[in-house]
Image: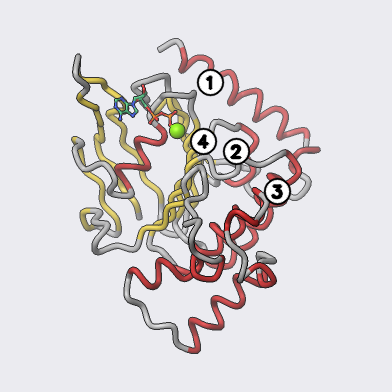
């Protein structure tokens, strides 16, 4: 379980202290997947930077499995907006990077896992290429593979599919949810896409305008629905979310 209690973050700039997020409190059960949605600048990336340990100065408490979240102790996977692949390393080396950093041994079981994930994501034939030689959709698939190969305690994704064109985005979302269903990695992703939140967020947390505070939490009945975009309920839920987000803007 990921537990965030009264978390708030501010940045100190030359002129003043900028409140960027919170205070917010929320929970994601183990094996859950939660979308955090909110307008641009409301503190979504800031939240992920705290959870991944990039930002350390914050108020409040973050617990993972009942212990204070510690990036040195917990395995935290982070897929940034630009996928975060190292351009000078091949696809294969990028995929194995987090294992190497953590000093994990690649035994038979791990080799099978790597092979399964790479096959599922269709990147087997790309292993010797470099990130510059990949399309956006292919880079995204490599980033997803790398995250699941690591088998993290917590997976964080920052607007994971926003850099892709509409068709690649739908394909990548489907592949992602397919592989997530297999491993049920506890996941928090932030997005400004209502469609993305409804499709791959089991729980949807709506943030207000900056500094983001929680406006509403929704248990999403349409999570992982087949043919979601043609579903009447989807239209209803997305227009409801849109109205809440607009209300949040005025806070
Ligand atoms: N390094 C920084 N220094 C000062 N202010 C920042 C910094 N990073 C982000 N901010 C401010 O914090 C707020 C939240 O930013 P961010 O988390 O990037 O929002 P989002 O990801 O939701 O678009 C914004 O008002 C932004 O201008
Ligand atoms: Mg952002």
Percent x, y for residue 159?
53, 40
* Residue 232 vertical position relative to residue 158 in the rendered view, above or below: above
Q: Which residue is mark 4?
A: 218
Quadrant in which residue 127 is drawn:
bottom right
Image quadrant where one finds the C terminus: top left
Name the colour scheme. secondary structure
Q: Which residue is mark 3?
A: 225
Q: Give the mark, 2 or 1, whose residue is nearer the N terminus.
A: 2
Q: Which residue is mark 2?
A: 162
Q: CA distance from mark 3 to mark 4?
A: 16 Å
Mark count: 4
Name, please, the residue furthest toward the right.
Answer: 230
Disc marking residue 244:
1
Asked if labels 1 and 3 touch by Cβ distance under 8 angstroms, the answer is: no
Residue that appears at 27% across and 29% down: 23
Q: Give the mark, 3 or 4, whose residue is nearer the N terminus.
A: 4
Q: CA distance from mark 3 to mark 1?
A: 22 Å
Q: CA distance from mark 2 to mark 3?
A: 20 Å
Percent x, y for residue 92?
54, 70
Quadrant in which residue 176 is drawn:
bottom right
Q: Nearer the viewer, residue 96 or 181?
A: 96
Residue that appears at 55% across and 76% down: 114
**Closer mark to the observer between disc 2 and disc 4:** 2
Image quadrant where one finds the N terminus: bottom left
């Amino acid at each position: 379980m990921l537990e965030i209690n009264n978390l708030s973050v501010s940045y100190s700039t030359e002129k003043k202290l900028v409140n960027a997020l919170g205070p917010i409190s929320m929970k994601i059960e183990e094996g859950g997947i939660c979308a955090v949605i909110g307008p641009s600048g409301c503190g979504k990336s800031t939240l992920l930077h705290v959870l991944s340990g990039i930002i350390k100065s914050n108020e409040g408490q973050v617990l993972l499995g009942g212990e204070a979240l510690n990036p040195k102790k917990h395995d935290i996977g982070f897929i940034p907006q630009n996928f975060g692949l190292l351009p000078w390393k091949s696809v294969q080396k990028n995929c194995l990077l987090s294992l190497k950093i953590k000093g994990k041994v690649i035994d038979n079981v791990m080799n099978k896992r790597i092979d399964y994930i790479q096959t599922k994501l269709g990147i087997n034939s790309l292993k010797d290429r470099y990130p510059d030689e990949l399309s956006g959709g292919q880079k995204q698939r490599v980033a997803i593979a790398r995250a699941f190969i690591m088998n993290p305690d917590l997976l964080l994704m920052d607007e994971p599919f926003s850099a892709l064109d509409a068709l690649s985005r739908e394909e990548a979302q489907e592949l992602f949810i397919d592989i997530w269903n297999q491993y049920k990695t506890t996941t928090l992703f932030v997005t400004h896409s209502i469609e993305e939140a409804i499709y791959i967020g089991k729980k949807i947390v709506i943030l207000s305008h900056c500094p983001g505070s929680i406006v509403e939490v929704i248990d999403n009945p349409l999570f992982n629905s087949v043919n979601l975009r043609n579903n009447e309920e989807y239209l209803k839920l997305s227009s409801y979310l849109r109205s809440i987000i607009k209300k949040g803007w005025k806070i």
